[in-house]
């Protein structure tokens, strides 16, 4: 296969990969998702990741229909990869893509769920030993991949981790692994390591000594001449001297002396040259013999080595995702035909940043969460169970009320579920989407932005099936009257196409009557806290239009006004939005009221 047939591999990239890896190895690296191999060949990590995503799940990337959906996807794989136990596992996570079939998503969920149960079931000490095994061997660049896999598998067994996700490692024959690991270590990168064979080490030492002596042949010649002046046979002096200085052995040195030489210097240099050649041949012959024996041991245990590579790679990948799932308390979603519902969902990005998050319950389409046993849910009396069957929700409410965050949370749940991963919710029901259209509010008020936005969000809705629409404040890119008309059209189009959608807007009162299977929900601000921060109940109320409550914002500005003129200006705004409401907010917020609370 030609490298240029892969997405993102042009002539220059192809030439670079072929030069560094060779065509066959480059194809293998792309097909198996080896980011490190492509990076080692000189490709930037980001480019290597994009190539591998397309090669190993290109169709799935088409689910990410907008720039904002792709941004959420990148953030998710970024957070998840931070929990990787090896860099290779991190690379595998980075190239994960949405899956297009429920069966594929269920299959990956089975593996991740099993790994999560295995990981959370380990004692803390065993967890440390497991992580240590990966860190010590799998991440050691000084040893080969096969030896690293064998030694990691042995260390995992030694750690006491067994059953569940560790079963594939535990099932490998221990004796075979130990024999293979030893042979792989002895055959260090194809060369027999020092300390493996005494005879080979002696020959290597002798060769090193001869080469060193030859490099200082002038000094050697002076010493030999000095001894020869005593009347001893010159050739015998040479043999005695070289044999004693190199441990090459008298017989080997004598056999290396030339039968004829032009002079004494030629005799000595020829002896060094012949002896070095003889020792080099002996080293190579002995090394071939020892290496043949070691490769035989590896071949005898090939099944164990291959099993270790596969088992350790898969375990590292699934344990990494398990650590991510455990740390964020993720739950396995249920897949449904045409619905989307979350019970107590949380935003991964906010939690990863250390922020406190109010769990939110929301649903569109067909779902079964509201029909569960009462003990299985904690729907509040104020919220109630999410309506069943509404295909579109128009979400309204307070500024800074978390509407955009809710859309992002729903996008996170949809993407994680479709990647075959658990989701940040107590429970969730998700249907597989062909297109996920997430559009954040972009404050650019011009015709070009309106056109580009419509081009990005309408085609997936009209050309695809099973589309999920998550659109934020459409009115930010055109005038309110036109925005209300366009938004109403999008809501109707979503319903008509059988898609699911949540549209955030401040124009709920300006919308025409919504079509059947569409509703309005609201998020409400409740006042100001002691620090003059807006208190918001982020849980939407179903079938209720939320209010922007500007009186709370004006009240906060009025309470913090600096100087008479500034205060007078905010008092004018207070009269405009409702002086009584502003005063009531300030009374509720007053330090005396706060002290009573």
Image: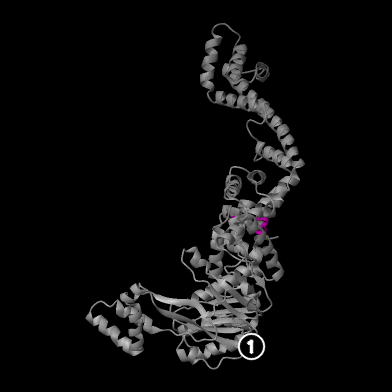
Instruction: Give the crowd class for mark 1: few <14, some 14-19, many >=20 residues within 10 Å.
Output: some
Where residue 123 sits: x, y (%)? 60, 50
Q: How many marks?
A: 1
Tell me which corner region of the image, top left, top right, bottom left or bottom right, holds residue 13: bottom right
Where residue 259 sits: x, y (%)? 67, 17
Q: Which stretch did the figure color magenta?
A: 27-35
Where residue 64 sits: x, y (%)? 59, 72
Tell me which corner region of the image, top left, top right, bottom left or bottom right, holds residue 293: top right
* Residue lying farthest to the bottom in this orientation: 512
* Residue lying farthest to the left in this orientation: 564
Residue 9 is at least partly visible in this image:
no
Residue 221 is at least partly visible in this image:
yes
Q: Which residue is mark 1?
A: 496
Q: Nearer the viewer, residue 6 or 151?
A: 151
Quarter of the rendering occupied by the C terminus: bottom left
The residue that appears at 54% across and 77% down in the rendered structure is 380
Q: Nearer the viewer, residue 101 or 399?
A: 399
Q: Secondary structure at mark 1?
A: helix
Quarter of the rendering occupied by the N terminus: bottom right
* Residue lying farthest to the top in this orientation: 231
Where residue 61 sits: x, y (%)? 62, 70
Q: Assess whether residue 34 is covered by the magenta stretch.
A: yes
Q: Assess whether residue 359 is covered by the magenta stretch.
A: no
The residue that appears at 35% across and 73% down in the rendered structure is 530
Compared to 291, does 251 lie above or below?
above
- Main SS of the magenta part reads helix
Tell me if 197 is positioned left or right of 224 in this view: right
* Residue lying farthest to the right in this orientation: 300
Compared to 537, does 423 lie above or below?
above
Tell me which corner region of the image, top left, top right, bottom left or bottom right, holds residue 50: bottom right
Tell me if 155 is positioned left or right of 472 in this view: right
């Amino acid at each position: 296969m030609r490298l240029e047939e892969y997405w993102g591999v042009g002539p220059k990239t192809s030439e670079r990969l072929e030069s560094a890896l060779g065509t066959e190895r480059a194809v293998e690296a792309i097909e198996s998702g080896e980011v490190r191999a492509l990076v080692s060949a000189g490709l930037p990590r980001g480019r290597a990741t994009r190539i591998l995503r397309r090669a190993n799940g290109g169709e799935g990337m088409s689910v990410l229909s907008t720039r904002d959906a792709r941004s959420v996807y990148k953030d998710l794989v970024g957070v998840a990869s931070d929990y990787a136990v090896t860099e290779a596992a991190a690379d595998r996570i980075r190239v994960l893509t949405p899956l297009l079939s429920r069966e594929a998503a269920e299959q990956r969920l089975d593996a991740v769920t099993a790994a999560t149960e295995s990981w959370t079931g380990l004692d803390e000490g065993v967890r440390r030993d497991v992580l240590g095994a990966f860190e010590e061997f799998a991440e050691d660049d000084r040893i080969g991949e096969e030896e690293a896999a064998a030694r990691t598998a042995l260390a995992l067994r030694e750690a006491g981790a067994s059953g569940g996700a560790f079963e594939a490692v535990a099932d490998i024959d221990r004796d075979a692994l130990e024999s293979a690991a030893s042979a792989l270590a002895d055959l260090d990168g194809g060369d027999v390591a020092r300390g493996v064979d005494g005879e080979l080490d002696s020959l290597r030492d002798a060769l090193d000594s001869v080469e060193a002596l030859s490099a200082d042949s002038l000094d050697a010649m002076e010493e030999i001449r000095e001894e020869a002046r005593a009347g001893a046979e010159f050739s015998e002096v040479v043999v005695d001297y070289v044999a004693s200085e190199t441990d090459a052995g008298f017989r080997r040195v004598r056999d290396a002396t030339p039968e004829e030489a032009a002079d004494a210097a030629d005799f000595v240099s020829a002896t060094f040259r012949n002896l070095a050649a003889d020792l080099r041949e002996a080293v190579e012959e002995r090394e071939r013999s020892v290496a043949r024996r070691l490769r035989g041991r590896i071949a005898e245990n090939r099944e164990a080595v291959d099993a270790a590579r596969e088992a350790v790679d898969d375990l590292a990948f699934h344990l990494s995702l398990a650590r991510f799932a455990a740390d964020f308390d993720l739950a396995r979603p249920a897949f449904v035909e045409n619905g989307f519902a979350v019970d107590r969902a949380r935003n991964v990005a906010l939690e990863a940043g250390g922020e406190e998050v109010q769990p939110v319950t929301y649903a569109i389409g067909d779902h079964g969460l509201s029909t569960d046993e009462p003990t299985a849910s904690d729907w509040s009396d104020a919220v109630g169970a999410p309506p069943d069957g509404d295909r579109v929700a128009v979400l309204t409410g307070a500024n800074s009320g978390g509407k955009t965050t809710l859309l992002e949370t729903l996008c996170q749940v949809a993407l994680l579920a479709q990647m075959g991963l658990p989701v940040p919710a107590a429970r969730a029901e998700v249907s597989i989407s062909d297109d996920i259209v997430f559009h954040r509010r972009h404050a650019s008020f011009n015709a070009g932005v309106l056109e580009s936005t419509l081009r990005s969000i309408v085609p997936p809705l009209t050309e695809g099936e099973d589309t999920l629409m998550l659109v934020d404040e459409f009115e930010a890119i055109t005038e309110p009257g036109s925005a209300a008309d366009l938004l109403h059209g999008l809501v109707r189009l979503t319903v008509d196409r059988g898609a699911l959608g949540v549209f955030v807007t401040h124009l709920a009162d300006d919308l025409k009557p919504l079509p059947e299977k569409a509703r309005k929900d609201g998020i409400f601000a409740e006042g100001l806290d002691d620090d003059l921060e807006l208190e918001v109940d982020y849980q939407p109320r179903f079938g209720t239009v939320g209010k922007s409550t500007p009186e709370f914002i004006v009240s906060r500005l009025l309470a913090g006004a600096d100087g008479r003129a500034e205060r007078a200006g905010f008092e004018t705004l207070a009269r405009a939005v409702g002086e009584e409401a502003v005063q009531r907010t300030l009374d509720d917020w007053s330090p005396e009221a706060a002290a009573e609370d």
